Image: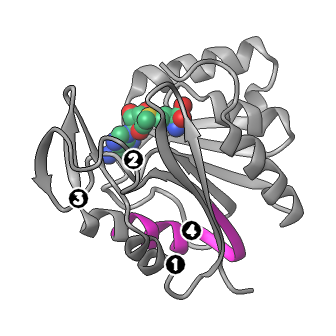
Amino acid sequence: MYGETPSAPARHAAGVFRAAQARDVLELGTGHGRDALHFAREGFIVQATDFSPAGLQQLEDTARDQGIEQRVTTVVHDVRDPLPLPDASVDAVFAHMLLCMALSTKEIHAAVAEVQRVLRPGGVFVYTVRHTGDAHYGAGIPHGDDIYEHGGFAVHFFGRDLVDALADSWNLTEVHAFEEGDLPRRLWRISQALPR
Ligand SMILES: C[S@@+](CC[C@H](N)C(=O)[O-])C[C@H]1O[C@@H](n2cnc3c(N)ncnc32)[C@H](O)[C@@H]1O
């Protein structure tokens, strides 16, 4: 659905991660791994997670075809559960269009707390979400908590207050508005770092 080429946010994040001297990258909600594969090709050691095993299998097959399987591992993981990683064990985390899935505000806060737990001091988190300026915000079936279902697909649209709350005790370095796809989807790319 999202193509084979890396997303623009992943290309940007690779530069952010490199500037932060990151080595170990965790991707949440990788899908079939277009961005995890990009990070691996860029030389990072990548752990890619999603709750869909089918996408992860495709990612592994492609990594083998591209000769980068040594640098990518996959884990089936539902972001509503604690991350299966030790404290302070990765340098950077990336999540493109995951936190705006059908997750409650409470679940989103818990997921970001887990990201904070597994990042090393100075670690960086780059994520993207659809926001309340999106054409589908307020359209379709309302599920409460800023979640709207459109065409069988439920999205949690982020307001700026939620972004700021999720950056509490982090250094929020960027909230960048961009568009993707035909609708177009209106998103924010958010970068935040833990204090060293
Ligand atoms: C909009 S897609 C984006 C996929 C990928 N990040 C990309 O840009 O190509 C959202 C992804 O999140 C995954 N996902 C949705 N809810 C999830 C959850 N609760 N836990 C883990 N993954 C989830 C879906 O399986 C899907 O692969």
Q: CA distance from mark 1 to mark 2?
A: 22 Å
Identify residue type, mark 3. Asp
Residue denoted by label 1: 167
Horizontal arrangement in the rendering, residue 155 relative to residue 127 (left or right): left
Identify residue type, mark 4. Val
The answer to whether the beta carbon of the residue marked 4 is less than 8 Å from any atom of ligand 1 is no
148 vs 73: above or below = below
Q: Residues within 10 Å of mark 4 (few under 14, many from 20)?
A: many
The answer to whether the beta carbon of the residue marked 2 is less than 8 Å from any atom of ligand 1 is no
Residue denoted by label 3: 146
Q: Residues within 10 Å of mark 1 (few under 14, many from 20)?
A: some
Q: Residue at x 62, y 70 (%)?
A: 119
Q: Residue at x 36, y 57 (%)?
A: 132
Q: Quadrant of residue 8?
A: top right
Span highlighted in magenta in the image: 110-125
The quarter of the picture showing ligand 1: top left
> Which mark identifies residue 118?
4
The answer to whether the beta carbon of the residue marked 1 is less than 8 Å from any atom of ligand 1 is no
**Of the residues under marks 4 and 1, which one precedes in the sequence?**
4
**Residue 44 in the image, given as x and y percentages of width and height:** 80, 45
* Front residue (pair 139, 10): 139
Q: Is residue 121 magenta?
A: yes
Identify residue type, mark 1. Ala
Residue denoted by label 2: 134
Horizontal arrangement in the rendering, residue 164 relative to residue 104 (left or right): right
User: Mark 3, mark 4: which one is toward the viewer?
Assistant: 3
